[in-house]
Image (tube, coloured by chain):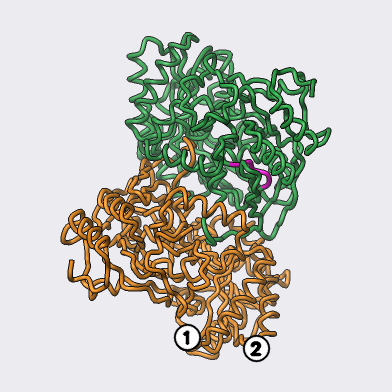
Chain colours: A green, B orange
Amino acid sequence: MDQIGIQHDNFRTAALDELAVALGHKGILTAPGDCVRYASDQSGLHGAAPLAVLRPASTEEVSGLLAICHRHRIGVVPQGGRTGLSGGACAPAGTVVLSTERMTGVIEIDEDAMTLTAWAGTPLETVQEAARTAGLDYPVDIGARGTATIGGTIATNAGGIRVLQHGMTRANVLGLEAVLADGSVISRLGKTVKDNSGFDLKQVFIGSEGVLGVVTRAVLQLRRYVTQSALALFAMPDHDAALKCLVAARQRFGSRITAFEGMWPDYWDFVCHETSLASAPLEGRHGFYLLIEIEAEAAGSEAELEEFFAELFEQELVEDGVLAKSLSEAQALWKVREAVGEVDGDFGHHINFDIGVSPSALGRFCTAADARLAQLPEAGAALKVGHVGDGNVHLLVAHDGSAAAEERIEAVIYALLEEWDGAVTAEHGIGRIKARWISHSRSAEELAMMRGLKAQLDPLGILNPGAVLQAAQDSREGRWRYRANPARELP
Amino acid sequence: MDQIGIQHDNFRTAALDELAVALGHKGILTAPGDCVRYASDQSGLHGAAPLAVLRPASTEEVSGLLAICHRHRIGVVPQGGRTGLSGGACAPAGTVVLSTERMTGVIEIDEDAMTLTAWAGTPLETVQEAARTAGLDYPVDIGARGTATIGGTIATNAGGIRVLQHGMTRANVLGLEAVLADGSVISRLGKTVKDNSGFDLKQVFIGSEGVLGVVTRAVLQLRRYVTQSALALFAMPDHDAALKCLVAARQRFGSRITAFEGMWPDYWDFVCHETSLASAPLEGRHGFYLLIEIEAEAAGSEAELEEFFAELFEQELVEDGVLAKSLSEAQALWKVREAVGEVDGDFGHHINFDIGVSPSALGRFCTAADARLAQLPEAGAALKVGHVGDGNVHLLVAHDGSAAAEERIEAVIYALLEEWDGAVTAEHGIGRIKARWISHSRSAEELAMMRGLKAQLDPLGILNPGAVLQAAQDSREGRWRYRANPARELP
């Protein structure tokens, strides 16, 4: 094993030898040049080059390698597409990476049961395309669809823009197979829709960010594929009016609403007027902007949105609006909302908060956040864009790039959030970056229960050490120093 | 404490004294005449009169009483409306009952967030009515709605006829408060729709039948209240044709389908021709019958169902059909389906299986079950009725009333179910009656993980002892003998 460029003791050499035998030539990477690109995800946090990258090709191989790592107490970082934004797939020093990149492909589509069974390493987009070929759809959708994997989206309970209609990833997983830290396989892939035969164990793995088990296969619930939709942009005086529009839209369109996205004027002005990221589809300045998309049952759904607009206009809830009359007009409207993914260059150093509160409190929370930020010399401009129906705002706060400014702004926003009983992360996950803030969203009793579950399912703490539950005063970029063998030292 | 009619040692006397002080006069019943009606649920299993009935009025009281019972190792059986069909609320000898009957009422309806917060003891129907008063709806619906409580429906993850559209109870719970065996309160009632801030702990309690914690309050996700619907009954050659109708209906109506209920001819003939439970809304004998209900967007939904029928008739998928043109006609159609709740008197001794398989396999499973039953001298007539879209059939098998016949029929059906990777209970729960069959639906690894979760959260085994996880060769009616202090002896 002399190709490993990191110092290790005989203990580890023995473990890596065993892993190499178990996984074969294709199943393990140990050359530093190969390993280094598995160090980090898209969070900006820098992981360490792993001791080895394990690339199992089956559930049995995942089970076997975890049994070996468990016996040797080697920390294992599960990785899908490494598109996470919270550092959940960043490797602490002294760990190995378990990549699902060779466990890929759609296993079965059952058109009658409307299910798709896939390996964890299958990219989300591959699943979506396979479903659509069968006239069906997998409704979980996020920007990283081409790279993010099914296993990763399940481990992080991915959200996205269609949560209002079909829920988070959790609501779309029918069956799951996962492997525990000691190699035990928990497999339930039988496509039953209703199954109250004991605890629903898959729920424990969904959204637990790889610290309780490694997802290997999943049965996904497909929906019909709706290709026709109607899209409109409404402008209104404030978030309160937008909330009233949401209530009215839900009464009128029910579960046909596919998107209900909100933009505050700070965000709108920045992307439409201060940058060339998008051009304003409406003139004038308004207090709030809503992008509303509904499933079209048949031709005529544009008329339904027009009628809806007229009704809201009558009630003085909306001030202006524009309906997309073509695909290119729809793309232009979406461009304003999606520009949030491209603001980095123009907006400079900033924190991207991913906040969840009650949908009925979102507007008031944002007003309160603006007031707190206004008193904070460290905080620059703030942009707000989000999923109004889900009570989820992405709040971007500019600062001077210093760790002190970042620290201060985070402390202020998360303290406020605690007052509002909100979530420090609505959809991106805790990972390693937000582990230090989790107590602002979870009580001491909840954290104790989480640690209890972790201790029960992974008593040696080998799975994704430092993610989610690390108290982590040292888990931020720059101050992120993992101990030599974190697996031994987790509570 | 001399009003307690059951022998107990000084140890228990001390515990009951402490409980009486903690809960006050209204909060505890100890007279045998008061306690005996809390012995059993609707399963037919006979529980023992509890040592005492604890009637807390707040989360704090639940926490306090559990801490006392934990310290004294007294088994606690949580009870809602006692409408369960699996014996999950039947009291083993030597336990106390925790009834939520004083923790009742709707706490808040948030029309903007479309949520309703209620105490666990609130009847389901009370919640539905409160939601409807606000123009909204809580879509979980079961026959026992008047008595079943929100806490009980959450603890058992209740299903019902609207699962196809809105999912089981799990899909409709946004926030939850539960108390662990040692009195720790796990509370998350903040109305966040999206919250990935660590493990989703509420999932652990939903569907765990009171063995991991006691539900005290919940935030429920409401939906719009749709009062208009269209209903039709279709007759077709077989289940395979019904499955094709389901696929076509989902493509055409999407999530507007509110019910998709199937009746096999054995069931149809029994309720329509061999009893006076219902009269046949269609003439002739067919291979399968479907009751299809869709949400009406506006007037004209009857025409939509007529058009759908014409299309299916063209494809020779349906042979006959009838559309409900009035409320009384709709009630007559529903009566055939709902007669399953009234067959007991006419059908005699029988087992009521609650089986879940993949929706695409349901027809073939039922054919295979009929074949196995035909070879079984112990089995009499079998009736099949169920939720086609959910792959859930209620299979009623008549027998001579002997325990031997019951045993043999259950063994054969559950062995078959294991071959089909199905659920021994789709919606009723394991409770105490099905605990001995759970291994037909769960692997050794899954059962070990369940026992691990139980050991972690309730290490002394005081919560609902004997439910779900009891290996239970002695848990059937007649042979159901609980040890004096089951809490001490659970694994």
The stretch in magenta equals A213-217
Find residue A284 and report its horizontal and vertical position in percent.
Answer: 44, 21
Q: Please, what secondary structure does the residue beneath circle 2 have?
A: loop
Label count reads 2
Nearest the viewer among A395 and A154 is A154
Mark 1 belongs to which amino acid?
A: Leu
Q: Please, what secondary structure does the residue beneath circle 1 have?
A: loop
Find residue B210 and report its horizontal and vertical position in percent.
Answer: 41, 58
The residue sitting at 55% across, 64% down in the picture is B426
Nearest the viewer among A476 and B459 is B459
The residue wearing badge 1 is B277
Chain that bears disc 1: B
Spatial CA span between label 1 and label 2: 28 Å
Does residue A170 show up magenta in the picture? no
Residue A258 seen in the figure: no
Residue B292 seen in the figure: yes
Secondary structure mostly taken by the magenta-highlighted segment of the chain: strand
Residue with the most extreme left position: B25
Q: Quadrant of the N terminus of chain B?
A: bottom left
The residue wearing badge 2 is B377
The residue sitting at 49% across, 29% down in the picture is A470
Left or right placement of residue B489 versus residue B369 in this view: left
The residue sitting at 34% across, 66% down in the picture is B81
